[in-house]
Image (cartoon, grey):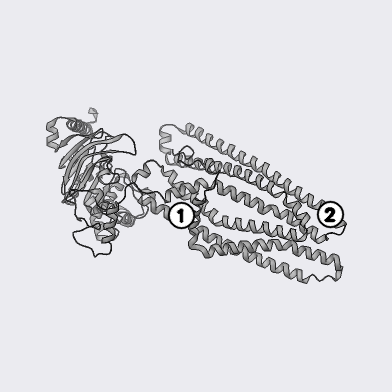
């Protein structure tokens, strides 16, 4: 199970929360630049809302002082109209900032996700080797949502809070300097308390969210793996694990509630202290005639409201600090540079040829469009800075030839093919295409000429037609049917209720493993690649279907370079050459007949598989032999 709590992504949230990197937030706030109009409107509505809020106690003051001075003869209509106008203005400004803030949040969230997704498409395989899918999903969902909220509503909170504080402070100072200074002395204490507690409350709230995510993952795994759980009688163990997670959720929730239960009374006490001081001193001033009744009541209202923006700004700053890790992770994703990319010389060639009309025999990088041969010379490879997993690999293949790779699991077969396809690059040595190091050719050109059929075939949500067309987006329906027929998929597709328009479900959940492999085969055939890679491509289909696929492939493989990774050795007898890969080295090489005559590892593997197949066939004919 992927555990985000235990995965070290290189970002210490507590350490990052101790500082605010302005350069980082400058990059993030750049996402709001295309929406300057909305940002200006949002700030304007925030200022307007704060100023209207400040005006209400002044209106109340005017009413009370007018009644106190003139009694029943007081003219209150101007104050009534002022109150109605202020309320109308407040309603309009609230609606305005909801619209502007929501628009900014939606656009910024989309832009960050778009940039992250675009970069994920460009990044090399090595990026995914050390980052779990769950980590990447969390970055593109929860982190992105968190930052877009801060970038949009954070502007509102900050502008409204500052304007409200300044407006109330100015109003109080204008009415009575002594009372104003008395109330304002509480602010630094409240700001400090608010910042300290909000950071801890947000930290515990994050722990609640993280534990909740782990509970959700546990639910998901339990449902998806219910058959395995029942087969191994793991229900009690699963329940114990789930209880452990829910207990953690309970503890985290209690911590969060405890902090909130301590924080709120402290804030209320400080606010009450300020109000009490203002009431005591203001009451004495009222008795001696220094201030009016309306002024004292307005002061009491301002004192109560003054601490709302202070608390809001404390919460905003704490959220900004706690979001530092999310910001670091998002930008590390958006700004990550692929390990495998075009060299400067290739980029210059691509730029020169970009505006030229297409040339029949030349690729976009100016090199030959056709692939005539691939040669691997003294090639070794290691993941990252680790121990080499491929050692001094040497072989060559020309168009029309099929290279089969066999050997024990973990021997390096798939890694070798991945290096040839330039999903990784050699640590030493080289891979030559028609005598030219493939690092001197365009990466897009090479990989657009690849077709891959994998053991775990991936099928996207949508119809069967959509999935086959993925290999060639401009393909006609006739081409799709032809590719499916060649791959042996046409028959089962027609048996489905809606044929090629059948929805396959999420990740092809409505198709069997064998059907997904056939759809994947059809997709690769439709792409018409110059290099075809088949990694255990027929492992999930029956022998009869496999035979039909082999017959269909004979025409497909003509004039192409193909690599076949197989454990079922009967499928590769006709390969041009068979390479036995063990421990990252080629230990045997030759045709089927040559390797059988050699009586080495391949001979033993083939003999054992043939014996097992014969035993199964005899057992099927006579169950007593089983």
Camera-side residue of 76 and 353: 353
Left or right position of 316 against 432: right
**Residue found at x 54% / y 62%:** 39
Kindly indicate the quadrant of the structure image that contains residue 541: top left
Q: Residues within 10 Å of mark 2 (few under 14, many from 20)?
A: some
Q: Which residue is mark 1?
A: 112
Q: Which residue is mark 2?
A: 283
Give percent across and percent down for residue 559. 16, 51
Residue 444 appears in the picture as rendered: no
Outermost top residue: 625
Camera-side residue of 216 and 70: 70
Q: Residues within 10 Å of mark 1 (few under 14, many from 20)?
A: many
Quarter of the figure that contains the C terminus: top left
With respect to residue 529, does 389 lie above or below?
above
**Residue found at x 82% / y 54%:** 282
Disc assigned to residue 182: none
Residue 252 appears in the picture as rendered: yes
Secondary structure at numbered mark 1: helix
**Residue found at x 68% / y 41%:** 262
Left or right position of 483 against 103: left
Give percent across and percent down for residue 455. 29, 43
- Nearer the observer: mark 1 or 2; the answer is 2
With respect to residue 578, does 51 lie above or below?
below
Secondary structure at numbered mark 2: helix
Outermost right residue: 288
Quarter of the figure that contains the N terminus: top left
- Earlier sequence position, callout 1 versus callout 2: 1
């Amino acid at each position: 199970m992927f555990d985000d709590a235990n995965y070290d992504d290189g970002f210490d949230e507590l350490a990052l929360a101790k500082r605010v990197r302005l350069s980082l937030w400058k990059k993030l706030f750049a996402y709001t630049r295309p929406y300057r109009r909305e940002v200006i409107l949002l700030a304007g509505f925030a200022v307007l809302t704060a100023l209207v809020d400040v005006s209400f106690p002044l209106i109340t003051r005017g009413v009370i002082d007018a009644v106190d001075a003139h009694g029943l003869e007081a003219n209150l209509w101007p104050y009534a109209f002022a109150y109605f106008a202020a309320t109308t203005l407040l309603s309009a400004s609230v609606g305005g900032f909801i619209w502007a803030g929501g628009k900014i949040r939606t656009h910024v969230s989309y832009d960050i996700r778009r940039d992250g997704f675009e970069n994920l498409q460009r990044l090399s395989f090595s990026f995914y080797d050390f980052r779990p899918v769950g980590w990447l999903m969390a970055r593109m969902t929860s982190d992105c949502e968190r930052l877009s909220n801060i970038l949009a509503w954070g502007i509102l909170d900050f502008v409204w809070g500052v304007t409200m504080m300044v407006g109330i402070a100015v109003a109080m100072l204008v009415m009575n300097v002594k009372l104003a200074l008395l109330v304002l002395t509480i602010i630094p204490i409240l700001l400090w308390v608010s910042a300290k507690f909000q950071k801890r409350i947000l930290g515990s709230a994050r722990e609640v969210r993280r534990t909740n995510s782990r509970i959700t993952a546990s639910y998901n795994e339990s449902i998806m793996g219910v058959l395995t759980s029942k087969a191994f009688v793991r229900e009690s163990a699963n329940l114990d694990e789930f209880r452990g997670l829910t207990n953690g959720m309970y503890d985290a929730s209690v911590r969060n509630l405890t902090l909130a239960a301590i924080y709120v009374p402290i804030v209320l006490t400080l606010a009450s202290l300020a109000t009490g001081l203002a009431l005591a001193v203001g009451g004495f001033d009222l008795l001696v005639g220094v201030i009016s009744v309306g002024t004292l009541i307005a002061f009491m209202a301002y004192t109560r409201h003054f601490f709302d923006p202070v608390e809001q700004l404390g919460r905003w700053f704490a959220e900004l600090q706690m979001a530092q890790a999310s910001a670091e992770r998002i930008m590390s994703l958006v700004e990550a540079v692929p390990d495998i990319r075009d060299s400067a010389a290739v980029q210059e060639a691509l730029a020169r040829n970009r505006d030229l009309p297409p040339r029949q025999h030349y690729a976009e990088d100016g090199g030959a469009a056709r692939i005539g041969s691939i040669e691997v010379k003294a090639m070794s490879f290691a993941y990252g800075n680790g121990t080499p997993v491929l050692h001094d690999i040497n072989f060559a293949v020309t168009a029309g030839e099929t290279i089969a790779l066999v050997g024990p699991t973990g021997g390096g077969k798939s890694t070798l093919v991945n290096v040839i396809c330039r999903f990784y690059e050699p640590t030493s040595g080289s891979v030559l295409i028609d005598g030219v190091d493939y690092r001197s050719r365009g990466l897009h050109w090479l990989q657009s000429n690849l077709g891959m059929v994998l053991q775990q075939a991936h099928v996207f949500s949508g119809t069967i037609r959509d999935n086959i067309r993925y290999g060639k987006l401009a393909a006609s329906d006739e081409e799709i049917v032809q590719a499916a027929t060649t791959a042996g998929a046409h028959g089962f597709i027609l048996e489905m209720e809606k044929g090629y328009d059948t929805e396959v479900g999420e990740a092809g959940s409505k198709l069997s493993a064998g059907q997904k492999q056939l759809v994947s085969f059809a997709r690769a055939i439709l792409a018409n690649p110059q290099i075809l890679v088949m990694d255990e491509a027929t492992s999930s289909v029956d022998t009869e279907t496999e035979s039909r696929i082999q017959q269909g492939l004979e025409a497909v493989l003509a004039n192409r370079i193909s690599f076949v990774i197989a454990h079922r050795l009967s499928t590769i007898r006709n390969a041009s050459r068979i390479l036995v890969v063990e421990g990252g080295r080629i230990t045997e090489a030759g045709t089927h007949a040559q390797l059988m005559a050699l009586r080495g590892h391949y001979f033993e593997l083939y003999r054992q598989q043939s014996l097992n197949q014969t035993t199964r066939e005899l057992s099927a004919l006579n169950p007593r032999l089983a």
